[in-house]
Image: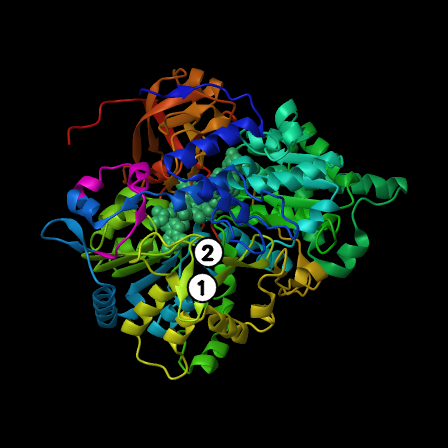
Amino acid sequence: MEGEKIQAYTGPAGGWGSASSLAEILTREQIPASGAAMLMKQNKPDGYMCVSCAWAKPAKPLAFEYCENGAKATAWEQTRKRTTPEFFAEHSVTELLSWPDYDLEEQGRLTHPMRYDAGTDRYVPVDWAEAFAEIGAELKALDPKSVVFYASGRASLETSYMYALLARMYGNNNLPDSSNMCHESTSVALPQSIGVPVGTVRLEDFETTDLILFFGQNVGSNAPRMLHPLQHARRRGVPIITFNPLRERGLERFTNPQSPVEMLTGASTQISTQYHQVKAGGDLAALTGMCKAVLAADRDAAQAGRPRVLDLAFIEEHTHGLKDFVRFCEAQDWAVLESRSGLKREALEAAAAVYMRAQNVIGIYGMGLTQHRKGTETVQMLVNLLLLRGHIGRPGAGICPVRGHSNVQGQRTVGISEKPELVPLDRLKEQYGFEPPRDKGLNTVEACTGILKGDVRAFIGLGGNFVRAVPETRLMEEAWRSLRLSVQVSTKLNRAHLVRGEIAYILPCLGRLEIDRQASGPQAVSIEDSCAAFHGSRGVSEPVSPHVRSEPWIVAGIAKATLPPNPKLDWDAWVGDYARVRDAIEATYPDVFTDFNARMFEPGGFHKPLAARDRRWETKTGKANFIVPAGLEADPDMPRSDRSVLDLITLRSNDQFNTTVYGYDDRFRGVKGTRQILLMNADDLARLGLADGDIVDVATDADDGVDRRVRGLRVVRYEIPAGNCGGYYPEMNVLVPLWHHDEQAKTPAAKAIPVRVTPATAPPPA
Ligand SMILES: Nc1nc2c(c(=O)[nH]1)N[C@H]1C(S)=C(S)[C@@H](COP(=O)(O)OP(=O)(O)OC[C@H]3O[C@@H](n4cnc5c(=O)[nH]c(N)nc54)[C@H](O)[C@@H]3O)O[C@H]1N2
Ligand SMILES: Nc1nc2c(c(=O)[nH]1)N[C@H]1C(S)=C(S)[C@@H](COP(=O)(O)OP(=O)(O)OC[C@H]3O[C@@H](n4cnc5c(=O)[nH]c(N)nc54)[C@H](O)[C@@H]3O)O[C@H]1N2
Ligand SMILES: [Mo]
C-alpha cells in the first residue's frame, strides 16, 4: 500500500495540477522536447486529430488546442518504449496474465507481428504474409456467421469503411463496436425521438445558448477541451445546471491552463450554477419532475391569462404525443419522484424555473445517462424536456451526447453496425457486385453471449481491448479460451492478447500520429467528431518500427487472403492512395460525403447534414416524438428493497483512457497511488459498520448462481449519494452481469450494479 494516499483535492480542473501531471507523463514516456512540440499540431486543420476524446475541433483553434488528457494520450502513443520480440521471448503468456493493465501497456509500442506458440507458451515473431495466409485459411474454413469483427472507436473513416466491407463480403453483419457499450442508448433513443442518431448541437451553438443542462459526463477528465466553450458561456452569464451523483471538479471550477493570467492569479471560473447530486439511475425521475414542474407552470399561466410556458406553435407543428406525455407526468407522485431521484421537489423546481426562463437550451450528457437499464428512456426524457420549449432545431439549442472514442461516431456513419437497416446495402451490392448479408449481426452483448455459448469461433479486433471492456470478466475470459482464432490489430499489449484463442495473432499498427507512407506518398485519414463534423488528419512523427503497418494495409491484407478476387474492388489501389477509399465512401454515401477529398481539411470540419437541425423529422410519425417511458423504476429486474444492497457506479479516473491505465492517481477525486478503492457515503458506512480506510469485498447481488466478486478494496468516504458507491472501470467489470444492460439498446448498465459490501475476508486458497 506504499505510495497510496487519499486526500481531498482542492484545486480547480485545469490549472497547475494539469500542467504538472502532463510534465510527469512526458518525462516517464521519454518524450523529448521536439516531441512535446508536436502537441502544437494537435487538432489543427494542418495537423493530426487527437486520439483521445471525440469533442469538436474549432475552426479557429487555440495556440494549444489540446488538454492534459489529450496530451497524455499523445505521450502514451509516442512513447520511446517498445514491446519487442525479445520482450515476448522473456515472458510467457501465463506470466503476463498476472500483470496489471498498466504494466502491460507501459512496455511501450508493439513492433512486430506476433503469433502465439503453444509449445513455449510465448508469442513469437511471424511474417506478415504468413500471418495473413493462416488467418485467411482459418476464416475460409469457418462458418461466416461464427466470426465477429469488432471495432474500437479509434480507427479512421477509411479503415472503418474497408473493415465493414470486409465483414459483409465475407458474409456477416457481425460488426459490434465500442459504441455498443457506450452511446448505443443514444443511437436507439434519438432516431425514435427526433429522427437522427446523433447530437444536433454544433460548437457555434455554445456561443448563443443561454442555458446548459449537464447530465452524467465528467468533462474535466473525459472531454477537457469542452471546458473552454463552457468557460466562455459562463463568462457570458449562462447558467449551467449539473446532475451528477459525484461532485466532479471539472464541473465545479476550471482554471484555463492556457491563460497566463489565470495561471498566475489562480483565478478560476465556477462552472455549475446548480449542482444536483442525483442518485445513480435517478435521472429519469429527475427529468420527469422537471417536466412536471414545467407543465404545471404552463397550466397556471394559461389559467391566469399570462404568456404560455410551452412553445405551443412548435409543439403543434413539429411534435407528436404531447397529450399522453402530459398525462404521464401528471400521474407521477412527487414523493416517488423524490425517492427515485434522490432530489427534493424544490431542487427540481429550481432547475425547472431556470429552464423556463431560458430561450436557447443545450442538453449535454454522457455515460451517466446511457449506461443504465433505462438508458434509452432516460435520453428520450431529456429530449422530451427540450421539446416542451422547442429546443431542437434552433441556433444555440439542442441535444448534445458527448461521444467517447475519437472516431466512434464516424465508424457508424461509414457502415460499422450490426444493424443492416442502417447501411445502404443495395448501394454496396451495386458498387461491388456482391450480395450483402441481410440478417442482423451480433452487437457486443450478443457477441459475448455467442462466445459464452460457443457459437462464435473467431474474433477479429480492430483496436480496443474487448475482453477487458465487456461485462462478466470471469466467465468471458474462460469462454474466450475456446475460440478457434483471435486476431488483434493493436498498438500496445493488452489483456485481449493474453486471454486468447487456440490460434492467436497480434498485428501491430501505426497510430494516427505517425506518418503513413504508401505508394502515392504520405497519406491522410479522416474522422468525425462528436458534433458530426468531419476532419482530415495527417501523421507527423516517424513510424515506431519498420515492421508495423497501417490499419488500411492490415485490413486489406486480411481481405485479400480471405475473399475471392473481385474485379470491382482493388484493395491494393486503395492502400496505395487513401483518397480512392474516400471516393468509394462518397459513392456509397453521396449526400453525406459530397466532395469528400476536396473538403476534408476545411477549418472546423465539414458537417454531416442532420434533418433534425432543420426541423425535418425522419421518424415514423414524421414529427419529433414525446416518448412516454414504461415507468420510473431505474432497474425493474433488481428490486432494491434491501438497504444493504448499494448501486455501484463504475468510473474512469483522471489517469486512464478506458482500459488504458496511464497511472494510479485520480487527482480531482483526491486518490493517489491506487485504483483499488470504493467510494462510499458516510451514512452507508455507519449503517454497514464500516469506516473510512477499511478494506472490503464487493459482490454482485444477483441470484443467477454466478459468483461475481472483487476483493480487497479500500473504502474512501466520499460525497456520493447514500445508497450509491463508486469504483473504477475496468477493474469492476467482473461485477457486471452480461444480462444487466439497457433494455432497448443493450448498452451494459455499468452505472448501477447492485452490490453488497462486506469487510474483507482472506481469499480462498488457490
Ligand atoms: N481522459 C479520458 N478521456 C476519455 C475517456 C477516458 O477513459 N479517459 N474515455 C472516452 C470514452 S470511450 C467515453 S465513452 C467518454 C466517457 O466519458 P463520461 O461520459 O464522462 O464517462 P464516465 O467517466 O464513465 O463518467 C460518467 C459521469 O457520469 C456520472 N454518473 C454516473 N452515474 C450517473 C447517473 O446515474 N446519473 C448522472 N446524471 N450521472 C451519473 C459519473 O459520476 C461521472 O461523472 O470519455 C472519452 N474520453
Ligand atoms: N464497467 C464499465 N465498462 C465499460 C465502460 C464503463 O464506463 N464501465 N465504458 C465502456 C465504453 S464507453 C467503451 S468505449 C469501451 C471501450 O472499449 P475498447 O474500445 O475496446 O477499449 P480501449 O481501452 O479503448 O482499447 C485500448 C486498446 O486499443 C489499442 N489501440 C490504441 N490505439 C489504437 C489504434 O490507433 N489502432 C488500433 N488498432 N489499436 C489501438 C491499444 O492496443 C489499447 O490497448 O469500454 C466499455 N466498458
Ligand atoms: Mo465510450
Q: Note whether 589 is above or below 366 in the view shown.
A: below
Seen at 78% across and 56% down, the residue is 314
Looking at the image, the residue that sits furthest to the right is: 305
Provide residue 287's location: percent of width, then percent of height: 63, 40
To which residue does mark 2 refer?
539
Seen at 37% across and 46% down, the residue is 469
Task: Kindly check if marks 2 and 1 are in contact, taking CB atoms under 8 A apart as contact.
Answer: yes
Amino acid type at circle 2 is Gly
To which residue does mark 1 refer?
522
Pick whichever, 84 or 225, lies toward us. Answer: 84
Seen at 73% across and 45% down, the residue is 207
Residues shaded magenta: 94-114
Looking at the image, the residue that sits furthest to the left is: 119
Q: Quadrant of residue 261?
A: top right
Provide residue 373's location: percent of width, then percent of height: 47, 45
Q: Where does the C terminus fall, quadrant-wise?
A: top left
Q: Note whether 19 is above or below 483 in the view shown.
A: above
Provide residue 79's location: percent of width, then percent of height: 37, 43
Count neighbours of disc 2 (C-alpha within 10 A) and say few if under 14, some if 14 to 19, many if 20 or more: many
Pick whichever, 133 or 469, lies toward us. Answer: 133
* N-term-proximal mark, 2 vs 1: 1
